[in-house]
């Protein structure tokens, strides 16, 4: 084995570790953005869904994505993957497999943002299996696995569409079927703020996601020989920074306060937006893409709330709206040199006309609609299997920590008013 092969495999294993550690970021982000009485449930759910996603991806997901294509719609080989000898993308087969697995798990975690604080544990389990087998792999095959959208020249370097938009549309289907949390809306339709219990957790979660994103984006170069991964990392950093600053400033200007949650979501929106285009655009364009992502996330959060969509983790804004923008952005900003190097055509602002932008728009519509419709149908199936998607009103008010798991995420905050009645226990700050 030559040194380049070994270095490439080592880099992708490091990138895999970074992407898996993003799950830690999601734990802190989601737990911090929701109420204390659900924190342990959210944290534990993230771990076991990582387990489910891994097993399903090994059994069928990888094969549906990268197996022999059936008419450009789905792969039909390489199930129960165990090939460590064959090389893929210049990598050991097992290294390539495990890196792709981490992306599938992230998409599922994004989808579950729409379930937060009101879904049954059984619904998570069943839908995790169905989504990991029949939603994410099909979209990924269309774009990355010799599918029909990839054949059109679709540009999605690390997954603004494949991972983020797909997960967001599944989250949207969940919010529609689950309906808003108790107390989110008044009778006149006006929203109430159900504030998260720990902004420090949320901020630390965003920072962990930001760091993990270098594995997500720069790892998608699949090698180190030309050091192109450094350029991808630079674009990633600039877009995230621009998204954070833009979101803070627009919130300050519009609502009169430099809102911290908006700023944090702006950083994530910049990261989501640059994920498709990080290998296709120049650094100045990465800044523009991040700025627009940060502004977009602020206004889309307000819009979805006004429309009655209760999205506790803002998956639709951060991963959906920013995912759409990030996908379209290559159709504007892709340079001829980078487009030639990484596939596709130059963007509109570089003399490429509307061709690439059209391909990007087609992919948004096709993948977004498929992910929503398929997830909606699979959630109806899940509902029939587990006897409803949502916990009872009493269980929701009590909190999912105690109602679903029988223990609190913060047991030291449980105040027992009597020594004999467990019904008198209440968790402070819930």
Image: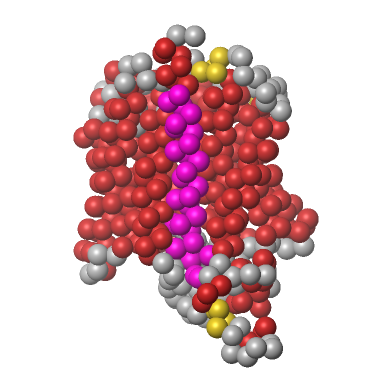
Q: Residue at x 33, y 30 (%)?
A: 232
- Tell me which segment is drawn in magenta: 10-39
Vertical side of 71 occupied by 100: above or below: below
Q: Residue 63 placed where, x, y %?
A: 66, 27
Vertical position of residue 426 compared to residue 334: above or below: below
Q: Is residue 342 left or right of residue 142?
A: left
Q: Is residue 330 above or below residue 262?
A: above
| Magenta segment main secondary structure | helix
Magenta span contains residue 29: yes
Residue 102, quarter of the rendered image: top right
For image coordinates 67% across by 84% down, the residue present is: 423
Residue 115 screen position, x and y as percent: 58, 59
Camera sees residue 415: yes
Q: Residue at x 59, y 62 (%)?
A: 41
- Nearer to the camera, 416 or 427: 416
Residue 357 lies within the magenta run: no
**Figure check: 103 above or below 65:** below
The quadrant holding residue 247 is bottom left
Q: Is residue 180 visible?
A: no
Indicate the position of residue 103 as horizontal and vertical percent values: 52, 37
Q: Nearer the viewer, residue 333 or 262?
A: 262
**Residue pictured at 54% horizontal, 43% vertical:** 107
Q: Residue furthest bottom?
A: 418
Query: How far across and how far down the image is residue 111, in percent?
Result: 55, 50
* The quadrant where residue 29 appears: bottom left
Number of numbered discs: 0
Give the image's coloring scheme: secondary structure
Answer left or right for 216 relative to 125. Answer: left
């Amino acid at each position: 084995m030559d040194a380049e092969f070994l270095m490439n495999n080592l880099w992708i294993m490091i990138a895999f570790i970074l992407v898996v550690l993003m799950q830690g970021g999601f734990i802190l982000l989601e737990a911090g953005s929701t109420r204390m009485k659900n924190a342990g449930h959210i944290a534990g759910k993230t771990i076991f869904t990582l387990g489910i996603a891994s097993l399903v991806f090994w059994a069928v997901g990888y094969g549906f994505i990268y197996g022999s294509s059936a008419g450009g719609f789905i792969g039909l080989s390489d199930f129960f993957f165990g090939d460590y000898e064959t090389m893929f993308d210049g990598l050991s087969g097992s290294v390539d497999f495990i890196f792709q697995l981490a992306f599938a798990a992230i998409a599922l975690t994004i989808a579950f943002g729409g379930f937060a604080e009101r879904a049954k544990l059984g619904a998570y389990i069943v839908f995790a299996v169905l989504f990991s087998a029949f939603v994410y792999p099909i979209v990924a095959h269309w774009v990355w696995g010799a599918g029909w959208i990839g054949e059109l020249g679709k540009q999605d370097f690390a997954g603004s569409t494949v991972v983020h938009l797909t997960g967001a549309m599944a989250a949207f289907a969940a919010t529609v079927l689950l309906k808003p949390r108790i107390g989110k809306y008044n009778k006149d339709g006006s929203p109430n703020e159900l504030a998260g219990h720990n902004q420090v957790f949320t901020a630390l979660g965003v920072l962990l996601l930001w760091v993990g994103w270098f594995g997500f984006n720069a790892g998608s170069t699949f090698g180190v020989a030309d050091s192109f991964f450094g350029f991808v990392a630079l674009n990633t950093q600039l877009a995230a920074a621009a998204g954070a600053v833009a979101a803070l400033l627009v919130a300050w200007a519009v609502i009169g306060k430099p809102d911290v949650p908006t700023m944090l979501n702006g950083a994530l929106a910049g990261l989501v937006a640059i994920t498709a285009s990080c290998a296709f655009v120049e650094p100045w364009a990465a800044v523009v893409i991040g700025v627009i992502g940060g502004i977009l996330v602020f206004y889309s959060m307000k819009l979805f709330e006004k429309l009655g969509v209760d999205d506790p983790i803002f998956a639709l804004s951060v991963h959906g709206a920013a995912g759409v923008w990030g996908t379209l952005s290559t159709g504007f900003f892709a340079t001829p040199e980078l487009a030639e190097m990484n596939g596709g055509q130059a963007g509109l602002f570089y003399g490429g006309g509307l061709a690439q932008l059209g391909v990007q728009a087609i992919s948004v519509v096709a993948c977004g609609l498929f992910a929503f419709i398929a997830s909606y149908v699979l959630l109806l199936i899940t509902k029939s299997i587990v006897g409803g998607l949502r916990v009872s009103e009493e269980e929701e008010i009590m909190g999912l920590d105690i109602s679903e798991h029988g223990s609190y995420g913060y047991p030291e905050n449980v105040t027992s008013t009597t020594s004999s009645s467990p019904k008198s226990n209440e968790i402070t700050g819930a």
